[in-house]
Amino acid sequence: MCTRVVAGLAVLLAAAEGGRGGAEVSPLDFKADLAIWTAVVFLVLLTVLWKFAWGPIAQGLDRREQGIAGQIARAEEANRQARQLLDQYQQKLAGSQDEVREILVQARRDAEKVGRDILDQAKAGAQTEHERAIEEIEAATADALKELGKMSASLAVELAGKIVRAELTPDSHARLITQAVANFDQQEPGNN
């Protein structure tokens, strides 16, 4: 690129000299004064570009590079924090799963205990009911035996009274027994 600029400047200078009435100049002819001026213009242009273009461009590129490096560092930090949060959430999730399992195990234990308690209460209630029924049966049996005893005594007294009033023959004895049994069947358990 520099050679093109130099060649372009040489052509311009040659054209300027050619317009003064000089001979035609070939761009391939070397002229020392033209070369010096070309070098001076090139150095001045290079200095101006260095100071006003390349410096700010280089600074801008450096700032951009630092900004990109900062963004990369922030992105890496955010990625690291996200991974930490993910690890924490996974640990919490694993902990909650263990907690759920423990709650289910405790609930099963409680349900079994309640079931056993209900079964024990039912057995105790059935045993109490059984004992009460036995007591009622025994009381009813005792009452029936008392009543039977009273009725037997009453019939025996009545039969004895009839025997004492009359002389008994075997036929009359059989008739008295049949009549006493018939009266016994007809009497109700509460009547004496």
Image (tube, rainbow, N blue to C red):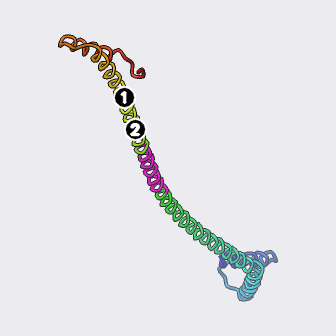
Q: The residue under label 1 is which amino acid type?
A: Ala
Give the x, y percent position of residue 11.
Answer: 72, 75
Mark 2 element type? helix
> Which of pointers 1 and 2 indicates the residue nearer the eye?
1
Q: Is residue 134 left or right of residue 16?
A: left
The spot of residue 135 in percent (x, y) is: 40, 38
Mark 1 crowd level (few <14, some 14–19, many ≥20, 10 Å Cα): some
Left-right relation of 140 to 50: left
Q: State the residue lying farthest toward the right.
A: 20
What is the total number of numbered labels drawn onto the structure image? 2
**Quarter of the N terminus within the rendering:** bottom right
Given the image, on which type of amino acid does mark 2 rest?
Glu
Residue 187 is at least partly visible in this image: yes
Residue sitting nearer the eye, 147 or 7: 147
The C terminus - image quarter: top left
Determine which of the numbered discs, if any, sits on residue 135 in the image: 2
Q: Residue at x 32, y 18 (%)?
A: 161
Q: Tell which of 98 and 160 is nearer to you.
A: 160
The reply to whether callout 1 and callout 2 are in contact (CB within 8 Å) is no
Q: Could you say where residue 182 lies in the image, as x and y percent from the top left?
A: 30, 14
The answer to whether residue 26 is visible is no
- Residue position for label 1: 144
Query: Magenta segment, which residues?
Result: 103-122
Q: Is residue 114 magenta?
A: yes
| C-alpha separation, residue under disc 1 versus residue under disc 2 | 14 Å
* For residue 113, above or below residue 77: above
